[in-house]
Structure formats: structure tokens, C-alpha cells
Amino acid sequence: MENITNSPEETYLLGKELGSRALPGQVYCLDGDLGVGKTVFTQGFAAGLGIEGPVNSPTFTILQQYEEGRLPLYHFDVYRIADVSEMDEIGYEDCFYGEGVCLIEWSQLVPELLPEQVIRIRIEKDLEQGFDYRKITVEGLEP
Ligand code: ADP
Ligand code: MG
């Protein structure tokens, strides 16, 4: 599934739509360059799960956990990870194989840890299409 957005609001709404349909145990891998909109998407996704509080990039903590929604949300941002053992320390396996929903910004940096079945979301810019243009590709989600 390929989606085009032309504003942060549209990306937020796409995230919200997917968040509202998220199921227990799903792992969403969110990849794309710095500043492309991964956190904007995640904020919408969290809203779709019924999480009302602020959602920011957990850049310095790797994992931020939200329990107040329809399902628990485990929001990872592994951008600054130095060694995969840091993932062991935070108990990532309980999240990946639990009953909540995982969303992993920069999942491409930890390919060896990812479960076999994931939903891949890739956000890309194309400056020729304008500064706010984003192509958002979703793979692995049943229609
Ligand atoms: P990332 O988490 O990928 O590093 P952020 O979500 O923090 O990126 O930031 C994305 C930035 O791009 C925000 O400043 C946002 O306002 C801007 N932006 C412009 N157009 C879009 C769009 N179509 N979708 C998402 N963000 C956009
Ligand atoms: Mg981010």
C-alpha cells in the first residue's frame, strides 16, 4: 500500500488510521531518514490507539511505553543505540512477543532482532515533489 501525504497533518491522520486498526502482538517497523516524519506518524498512531498524552521521540531512552490506550504501545527509537545488548537490557523481547503493539523507529539498525513477521512502513521524501511531500509505503498489513 502506497500513500502520498503533503503535510504533517496528513501523515498524522494516516498514522491514526493504522493505529485505530492495530492488533495485539503486531510489530511495526518505521524507517526513513532523519526528519522525514516518523515521529509525526507515531503520534497519530498513538492517537489511533486512544493514547491522549504527548508522544515524543524516545531518542535518549530507546523505549517509551504507553499503557493508557486500547492496547499497550511500545515505542522504540533505536537511532542512538550503540550495541544491541542495550535492547536486551530493556527487555525488548517481552515487547516484541507480547500482547501490545510495537513501533520501532530506525528498525533497519537492528535487523537481527526483528521478528519474522513485521509490518514495514517506509517514509520517503522527494524534493522534486515539494518540501512537504512524503511517500509512505506500508507492507505486510492484511487488507
Ligand atoms: P523523524 O521522527 O522521522 O526524524 P519528525 O516526525 O520528528 O521526523 O519530523 C518530521 C518533520 O517534517 C516535522 O517538522 C514535520 O512538520 C515536517 N513535515 C513536513 N511535511 C511532512 C509530511 N508530509 N509528513 C510528516 N512530516 C512532515
Ligand atoms: Mg523521530
Image (tube, rainbow, N blue to C red):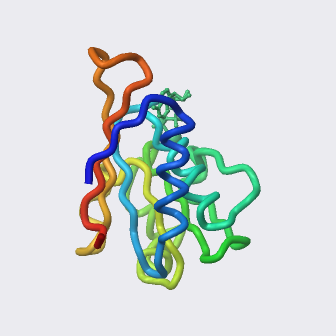
Residue 103, relative to residue 94: is it above or below?
Answer: above
Q: Position of residue 3 (x, y in %)?
A: 33, 44
Quadrant in which residue 138 is drawn: bottom left
Query: Which residue sits at x=48%, y=83%?
Result: 98
User: In the rendered picture of this protein, how many numbered marks are placed on residues?
Assistant: 0
Q: Nearer the viewer, residue 4 or 64?
A: 4
Left or right of 133? Residue 10 is right
Indicate left or right for 103 with 2 as reference.
Answer: right
Closest to the observer: 105 or 24? 24
| Left or right, residue 58 beside residue 121 | right
Residue drawn at x 64%, y 58% is 47
Q: Which residue: 45% across, 64% down?
A: 87
**Location of residue 53 in the rendering, given as x and y in whole percent from the top left corner:** 76, 55
Query: Is the C terminus in the top left, top right, bottom left or bottom right quadrant?
Result: bottom left
Pick the quarter of the image with the N terminus.
bottom left
Q: Is residue 66 above or below residue 39?
A: below
The residue at the far right in this view is: 53
**Residue 117 percent across, percent down from the top left:** 26, 74
Tell me residue 74's x, y (percent). Answer: 55, 66
Q: Tell me where residue 112 sits by quadrant.
A: bottom left
Query: 137 or 58: nearer the eye?
Result: 137
Q: Residue at x 74, y 58 (%)?
A: 52
99 w.r.t. 8: above or below? below
